[in-house]
Amino acid sequence: MLYTILKFAATAALIVSISEIGKRNSLAAAILASVPLVSVMAMIWLYLETRDAAKVASLARSIAWLVVPSLALFLSLPVMLARGYNFYASLGVSIALTVASYALMIVLMRHLG
């Protein structure tokens, strides 16, 4: 139980840190957010809990494929905001595009094996 709380705390600390840094320096926050720290932490925790390198490799491979559809959010959101759309509407549309992109990628991944 303590280990689970530690995992939650580490993840929350990372998110809060990025948010706080973003208030002062968006580039520094973007660099920190773009580095796959959460993915690396998840892979470390998965390995520590299972000692199964194959599971870690599978997770890393799946993450790699799913980075592509996540770009839908990061490309559509700034375009919509720059055009003056409401923040929440822009975020909602960007999230919907991202969900659709994930669904398409999952179908593609299943088709390709």
Image: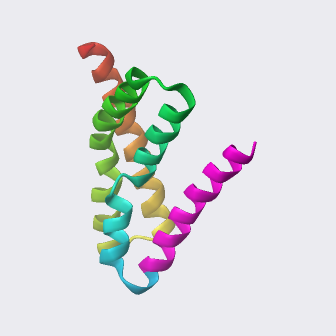
Pick the front one: 92 or 68: 68
Look at 33% across and 16% down and name the residue there.
110
Residue 103 falls in image quadrant: top left
Look at 59% across and 60% down and name the residue there.
12
What is the magenta segment's predominant secondary structure?
A: helix
Q: Is residue 5 left or right of residue 25?
A: right
Percent coordinates x, y for residue 51 in the rendering: 49, 26
Residue 58 falls in image quadrant: top left
Residue farthest along the right direction in this orientation: 1
Residue farthest along the bottom direction in this orientation: 24
Pick the front one: 88 or 63: 63
Magenta highlight on residue 76: no
Q: Does the image show residue 103?
A: yes
Count the marks: 0
Q: Is residue 30 above or below residue 57?
A: below
Please state, as top left, top right, bottom left or bottom right, where the N terminus lies in the image. Answer: top right
Q: Is residue 103 left or right of residue 92?
A: left
Magenta highlight on residue 14: yes
Q: Which residues are magenta?
A: 1-22
Residue 43 falls in image quadrant: top left
Please state, as top left, top right, bottom left or bottom right, where the C terminus lies in the image. Answer: top left
Percent coordinates x, y for residue 81 in the rendering: 35, 71
Look at 33% across and 68% down and name the residue there.
30
Pick the front one: 83 or 44: 44
Q: Is residue 64 left or right of residue 94?
A: left
Q: Does the image show residue 84?
A: no
Percent coordinates x, y for residue 62 in the rendering: 35, 30
Look at 52% across and 39% down and name the residue there.
45
Pick the front one: 51 or 112: 51
Percent coordinates x, y for residue 84 in the rendering: 35, 75
